[in-house]
Amino acid sequence: MGFIKEFRDFAVKGNVVDMAVGIIIGAAFGKIVSSFVGDVIMPPLGVLIGGVDFSNLVITIKQAAGDAPAVVLGYGKFIQTLIDFTIIAFAIFMAVKAMNSIKKKEVEAPKAPPAPTKEEILLTEIRDLLKEK
């Protein structure tokens, strides 16, 4: 029973749950960015460079023969993946930069000094009385 309890304790720790949520959100974010790049960024970019569709850019290494399909290098899809990565990396950079800025403001925020305790007030009064003598 100890192994199962140990695994349950591990699985429900805050860090593991936070990591799982981050991975799920990251996967969804990746799909959004891929769609943004493929459906919004790439078509106008293709038009600007002469109607090129990046997903169709290939170098044929070996032509199709009979039932065997052609062997191709799909560098157009690679270019699209690089653009996806760049946009995702920039978005993550901006999010981390914003979070660091918020944390920095929290750390730099001046805190009011704590109110003196009864003991400190009493000691201050004693000090003042001794100074008067």
Image: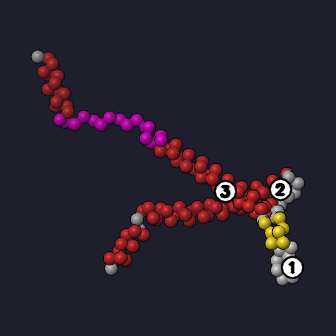
Give residue 18's position: percent from left, percent from top. 47, 62
Which of discs 3 and 2 lies nearer the camera? The answer is 3
Check the image and name the residue furthest to the right.
Answer: 50
The reply to whether discs 3 and 2 touch (Cβ–Cβ < 8 Å) is no
Residues in magenta?
A: 104-119
CA distance separating discs 1 and 3: 35 Å
Check the image and name the residue furthest to the left.
Answer: 133
- Type of residue at label 2? Gly
CA distance separating discs 2 and 1: 31 Å
Mark yes or no: residue 36 visible.
Answer: no
- Type of residue at label 1? Ala
- Type of residue at label 3? Phe
- Residue shown at the point (44%, 37%) measured from the top left: 108
Task: Name the residue that disc number 1 marks.
Answer: 65
Task: Name the residue that disc number 2 marks.
Answer: 46
Give residue 106's position: percent from left, percent from top. 45, 42
- Residue shown at the point (52%, 48%) measured from the top left: 99
Q: Residues within 10 Å of mark 3 (few under 14, many from 20)?
A: some
Task: Name the residue that disc number 3 marks.
Answer: 85
Is residue 12 found left or right of 131 in the rendered image?
right
Q: Nearer the viewer, residue 44 or 113?
A: 44
Give residue 111's position: percent from left, percent from top. 37, 37
CA distance separating discs 3 and 2: 18 Å
Which of discs 2 and 1 lies nearer the camera? The answer is 1
Q: Earlier in the sequence, mark 2 or mark 1?
A: 2
Q: Based on the picture, tell me whether residue 28 belongs to the magenta stretch.
A: no
- Residue shown at the point (78%, 65%) measured from the top left: 74
Asked where in the image residue 41 lies, by quadrant, the reply is bottom right
The reply to whether discs 1 and 3 touch (Cβ–Cβ < 8 Å) is no
